[in-house]
Amino acid sequence: MSVPEVIPIAYEPDYRTSTIGRWDGGQFLASVTAAFPEGLDAGDDWREHKRWYAVLHRFDEAGGHLESSIVSTGTTAEGERRAVEAARRLLDGWLEALPGRRYESIAVAPFAVRWEGALFGLVVEAHSEDGGESDWVELYPDGLGFSAPWDGLYDT
């Protein structure tokens, strides 16, 4: 089964997809996540390069990507707990500002945004030219993988 044009993502309260849903302007996917710049070989300095982010992706009703808000709140080296808490506060404010916000399952098209050298998005990981069963879609940098039977559930 090939990768569908829009990828179902199941809403799971109190888990990794607890901040997804719909608002008056379409759909949204939000998270607090960490990322490294692509291609980085940080070695012993990985804490300096692991950045924490508040992320809010907005989509139209059909699942097309509209825009992303991505803000770094610090590195693990600067204090991971502080950075995560700051990202959560920022994300909470963004979510509160979405008119008509309701948490529920969504279906959105693959997209990619690069920010501060890191990849954010829902990216097709194709392993065959004709779209075979080994193809999947990965949410970066969150590390959630979606695949057939395309029921909205993910692997980590």
Image (cartoon, helix red, strand yellow):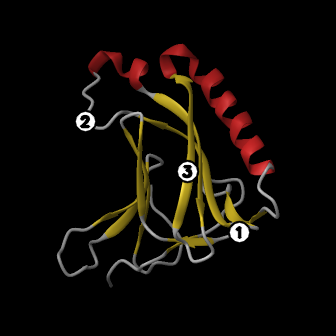
Is 116 situated above or below 102?
A: above
Front residue of 81 and 66:
66
Q: What number is the disc on residue 104?
A: 1
Mark 3 neighbour class, 10 Å CA radius: few under 14, some 14 to 19, many 20 or more: some
- The quadrant in which the N terminus is found is bottom left
Residue ID at (42%, 78%): 5
Residue 125 figure quarter:
bottom left
Total marks in image:
3
Q: Is residue 40 left or right of residue 76?
A: left
The residue under label 2 is which amino acid type? Gly
Q: Tag 2, which secondary structure?
A: loop
| Mark 1 surroundings: few (<14), some (14-19) or many (≥20) residues within 10 A | some
Residue 66 x %, y %: 55, 61
Q: Do the residues labelled 2 and 3 touch (CB within 8 Å)?
A: no
Q: Position of residue 39 (x, y in %)?
A: 25, 35
Is residue 108 left or right of 22 when viewed as pictured? left
Question: Closer to the observer: label 2 or label 3?
Answer: 3
User: Residue 68, which numbered label?
Assistant: 3
Label 3: element kind: strand
Q: What residue type is labelled 3?
A: Ser
How many residues crowd around disc 2 within 10 Å: few (fewer than 14), some, or many (20 or more)?
few
Query: Is residue 136 rendered to the left or right of residue 17?
Result: left
Residue 134, image x and y in percent?
A: 26, 72
